Image (spheres, rainbow, N blue to C red):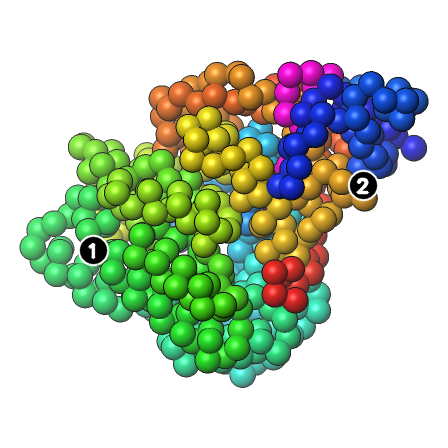
Amino acid sequence: MSRTVIHGGLVVTASDEIHADVLVEDGRVAALAAHGTDAAASWTAERTIDATGKYVIPGGVDGHTHMEMPFGGTFASDTFETGTRAAAWGGTTTIIDFAIQSKGGSLAEGLDAWHEKSDGKCAIDYAFHMIMSDVNASSLKEMDRLVSAGVTSFKLFTAYPGVFLSDDGQILRAMQRAASNGGLVMTHAENGLAIDVLVEQALERGERDPRYHGEVRKALLEAEATHRVIKLSQVAGAPLYVVHVSAQEAVAELARARDEGHPVFGETCPQYLFLSTDNLAEPEFEGAKYVCSTPLRPKEHQAALWRGLRTNDLQVVSTDHCPFCFKGQKEMGRGDFSKIPNGMPGVENRMDLLHQAVVDGHISRRRWIEIACAAPARMFGLYPKKGTIAPGADADIVIYDPHAEQVISAETHHMNVDYSAYEGKHVTGRVETVLSRGVPVIENRAYVGHAGHGAYLPRGLCQYTN
């Protein structure tokens, strides 16, 4: 039996802040006891971690990543090995990536392809959602089998015609199936058909720089698609999770539905909270670094996103980590913004940026842990195995120094990408040590993990709706 004691820290979960020592046995949390008590003093262990003056927090759960994702003739630059290592550096101990069904292929074939990419490669634990690119009678039946096998969420797109887009009828059918099997439908909500018209018109006018990516993907078209998928989910009697919400108008649609009592949920991402169209407009094609979809919005949208996180109209902050190098990949869109690969790096930065939001007064410490750890674990059927520090939970634990200062930079990050979206940003707080199932992955700011430690996680159903 392997035992670790973490002593002297402030344990912060979504529900509590307690000065407690933590006993880890065989990869799980065995007990918590207040500092200096007889119970804590009686523990013996092979390893002792001094967390005095530090936070002891659950490992982050990033519910939205795209490692090695094919897009626009290239692939996301992080592999499952490099991407999960970077996640660990940033205090994230679980990722949920998106397996992709190919047009004409089965869901099972898509899932098998992602297992081939990931199995034996990950430094931390991982799970999968399924992107449905081809909704038909066969793939609808397959949804039941995937739910039984622990892939319990399915992403559909109202964007990217000819690649991922599903029409309203297909989305409704998938939602109806999810209503019967307990699965959760996730949607990328933008009106892709209308956006394609605006892209064509912009290019005809000679508007080719990266900033036009944001201008054609209008906030109203995000709001319209969000409204539409909410209404489809109500018709189907199914819960709905809207990914990467970026616009205040889309937040309003979610809030309205939630106020009416509908099981509708929303996710946003650090890029929408900390970046804006000012970045897309950076000169000399630098704006290409910030091309993602949904796009960055004007700064005035940020207040609505923070408010949504405080009021729980937005429940989760994930990264939508989908990195493409500036040189050789983002540059594919020089002279035509529509050819810039859509995606940004961020899996390593999320926990630190959200701690900075605590420092800045946007959210509380417990809300930080809620939106980054507990809520995604509950949303995707992993709680309380993941997302908390409690007896029986996996010992995915981060020792976090809330006073350390750092400057985010591509020179020091560990993601396999040649730029940082937050280059030069000063933040307060830094990961010191990371345990994954009780095993050190980061120890005193050094990587001690290895590819293959991460275990695949079959998931349960959404715990907010089942």
Q: Which structural element holds mark 1?
A: helix
Q: Residues within 10 Å of mark 1 (few under 14, many from 20)?
A: some
- Find disc 2 in the rendering and name its residue: 391
Whether 51 is among the magenta residues is: yes
Residue 447 percent across, percent down from the top left? 64, 24
Q: Which residues are magenta?
A: 50-61
Depth-wise, is mark 1 or mark 2 nearer the camera? 2
Residue 354 percent across, percent down from the top left? 48, 34
Residue type pointed to by label 1: Val
Q: Residue furthest left?
A: 205
In terms of depth relative to the viewer, which is nearer, 138 or 388? 388
State which quarter of the image contains the C terminus.
bottom right
- Residue 216, which numbered label? 1
Q: Residue drawn at (62%, 46%), measured in percent from left and top? A: 374
281 on left or right of 306: left
Q: Residues within 10 Å of mark 2 (few under 14, many from 20)?
A: some
Q: Residue drawn at (12%, 49%), measured in percent from left and top? A: 207
Question: Image height check: is 342 above or below 47?
Answer: below
In terms of depth relative to the viewer, which is nearer, 159 or 386? 386
